[in-house]
Image: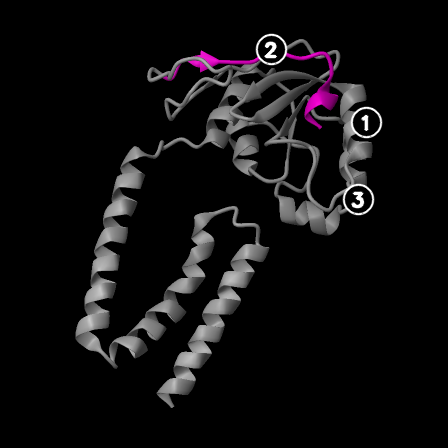
Amino acid sequence: MKQVALLAFTVTIAYDVVSIWLGGSYWSHYLLQLVVPVSVAAALVIERKPLVVGGVLLGFTVVSAAASLLASMNHPHASRGQALGAAIGAASRPGDTIVTIWGHSDVTHSSGLRTPYPYLWSLPTLTLDPDLRLLTRTLDGPRGPTWFVAWSTVKHAGVETSTLASALADYYQRVEVIDGSTVYLRRGADRPAPLATRADGARRAEGGDDDARGEPFRLLAGPSPHALL
């Protein structure tokens, strides 16, 4: 019976690993689903050789806890998305709106701006707007957002983005590149370029020295947004 139970939990662990991988691994809390099957499976294995296996698992637990503690102490409290959103909010005017694509809705939340596009996360976009027609119409229409943020690039695996890229090139100009995220401003809108403060003291985007003081930085706009699409 124990052999069957161990096999069942092994299959469950394998299923969880696959589901985490298919989920895109956006957040580490996806790993929580592994806690129960791994714990029970470990208990079944420990019962066979409690001293040897238990000692190994205890050592692994202590090392993992210490590593997690050190990582949390060195990790910035404010995320990149929060810093970017706050910077855009500071550069905005009343009535401005924003769209952030492919996740990272914390940018939208931290900006304090409303969004004309209803899908703030990548999965709803891929499921409910897979051809990006609604998103493209949103950019083309009179309610087009003042700000448009691509976390990395507009491209996404398995999604046709050429129409979206054309609309972005027609109606928006690139004004900022912050930690790999590209900020676009609607053409005709006169706003200062948002300045984000690095929370982690990482190397400046233009290859300068480490910025331990967290001073603002920016890259100026290029001639065309197609370079990053």
Q: Earlier in the sequence, mark 2 or mark 3?
A: 3
Identify the image quadrant of residue 95: top right
Mark 2 secondary-structure assignment:
loop
Residue 35 horizontal side relative to residue 19, left or right: left
Q: Residue at x 79, y 39 (%)?
A: 134
Q: Residue at x 53, y 26 (%)?
A: 85
**Number of the label disc, if any, that sits on residue 166:** 1
Give the total of numbered labels: 3
Q: Please name the amino acid that badge 3 sits on.
A: Asp
Residue 106 horizontal side relative to residue 64, left or right: right
Q: CA distance from mark 3 to mark 1?
A: 14 Å
Return the residue at label 3.
Answer: 131
211 w.r.t. 144: above or below: above
Return the residue at label 2.
Answer: 220
Q: Residue at x 76, y 25 (%)?
A: 168
Q: CA distance from mark 2 to mark 3?
A: 31 Å
Q: Residue furthest bottom?
A: 1
Query: What's the magenta region?
Result: 214-229
96 w.r.t. 33: above or below: above
Q: Earlier in the sequence, mark 1 or mark 2?
A: 1
Q: Earlier in the sequence, mark 3 or mark 1?
A: 3
Answer whether residue 131 is visible to the viewer in this image: yes
Question: Of helix, strand and loop, which mostly describes the magenta segment?
Answer: loop
Identify the image quadrant of residue 170: top right
> Is residue 222 found inside the magenta-colored segment of the image?
yes
